[in-house]
Amino acid sequence: MEENEKIRENFVHLARIALSERQQDVHSFLHRIVRRSDDAKLSQELVELLRQKPTRSSPLRKKQEMALPVDADSRFQLLRVEEHPELPHEPVYTDALKGTIDRLIDERKNSGALFDVGLEPTRTILFTGPPGVGKTMTARWIARRLGVPLLTLDLSAVMSSYLGRTGSNLRHVLDFAKSMECVLLLDELDAVAKRRDDSGEIGELKRLVTVLLQQLDDWPSSGMLIAATNHEELLDPAVWRRFEEVVHFDVPSADAAEAFISSLLKGFMPKADAWSEVLALSLLEQSYSDIERKITGARRGAALNGKKLSDHLVPLIAVDSQTKQQKIELAVKLYAEKLVSQRRAQELTGVARDTIRDRLNADNES
C-alpha cells in the first residue's frame, strides 16, 4: 500500500510539471527517479530515454515560443540573449583553469556516461575574481563550445523601481532560462546576493537572496547556471554553499599575459613575439581587459596617424613597479631585439647603457 501511494505521488507530480510545460523540470524529476529507484529495469529505460531526448535542432522538439521576460513597469527586457556567442579572440588560461573549464564542458558533452551511474553534470558554477580577468568571456566561451545560447541577466533591469516586483523579475528570468538548453550568466551576483546580515540593505534585497537560493536548489541539470562576482566577500554564506563548483580567476601571470598580448598583435606588426614579451613584463599584474584596452588604443593611434604600431607601443612600457633586475632584463630585451635604440632603452628603463652592454656581453659569453 505504501509503495502504491509513493507511485501515485510521483505520477501526479510528474503530470503536474509536464502540464506546466516545464521541460527541464521533467528531466530533473526523471533523474531523481533514476537515482532513487530500486527497479533496475525502470532506471535503465529512463536513462535511455534521457540520453535520446530530442536536441535543440531536432524536429521532434517543440519550438520554444516564449517571449523574453520584461519588467512589468519599464517594459525593459530582463535578459540579453546571444544565440551564437562570439569572442573577439580566443581566451588564454592557466593549465589548471583550462583543465577545470574543459572538464565542465566534457561533463555536458558526455552526460550519458554520468546518467548511466546515477550522476548529473555540474549545474551551478560560481566565477570569482577581480574585474577584467575573463569571467564573462569564459561564460561566452563555454556556451559557444556547447553550441547553446548565452542568456545574461541584466541586473540593472531586474531591480525594479517598485522593489516588490524585483523578486518576481528574478523568478521570471530563471523560469525562462529553465525552459531551454542554455548557459545562464548572472553577472555581478553580489548586487543581488548580498549578505543577509548586512544591516545597510533593505528587506526586499534580503528576500531576493531567499528567491535565489530556492532557484539554485531547483536548477535542472540540462542547463548550466554561471554566476560571476567581483566582490566575493559580499556574498551571503548560504549562496556559496549552493554552488556545486567555485572557479577563481586571477590577473594573468607573465606567461599568460605574453600569450594574450601575442594574440592581439600577431598579424599586425613585425616582431610581435618580442613586443609581447616586453609588454608582458611592463603590464604585469594588470587585468586582461586593461591590457586589451591599451593594446587596442595603440592600434587605433597607429591607424589614424600612419605611424608604426611600435611607436605607439613604446609609451606602454612602464617600470615603476619593477625591481632593478627586472628593469635590466627589460632594457636588454628592448635593445637586443632591436625594438629601440640603446639610448632609448636607457631612457625608458633608467638602466645605464654600460650596464646594458655588460649584460649583453655576459649573455653572449655564456
Image (cartoon, rainbow, N blue to C red):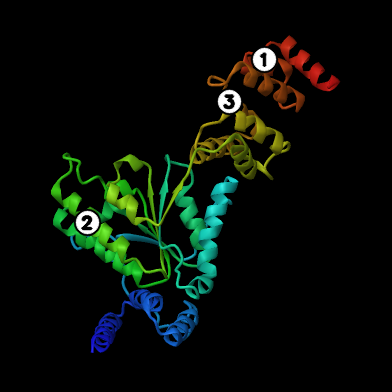
Q: Which mark is residue 40?
A: none
Q: Label 3's element?
A: helix
* Circle 3: residue type: Pro
| Residue labelled with disc 2 | 210
Mark 3 or 1, which is nearer the eye? 1
**Which label's residue is closer to the chain start, 2 or 1?**
2
Mark 2 or 1, which is nearer the eye? 2
- Between the C-alphas of marks 3 and 1, the distance is 14 Å
* Circle 2: residue type: Thr
Q: Position of residue 297 (x, y in %)?
A: 54, 36
Q: Position of residue 171 (x, y in %)?
A: 25, 64
Q: Is residue 85 visible?
A: no
| Residue labelled with disc 1 | 346
Please indicate whether residue 273 sits to the left or right of residue 315 in the image: right
Question: Who is closer to the viewer here, 179 or 74?
Answer: 179
Q: Position of residue 140 (x, y in %)?
A: 48, 57
- Find residue 298 and report its image quarter: top right
Please indicate whether residue 302 sits to the left or right of residue 56 in the image: right
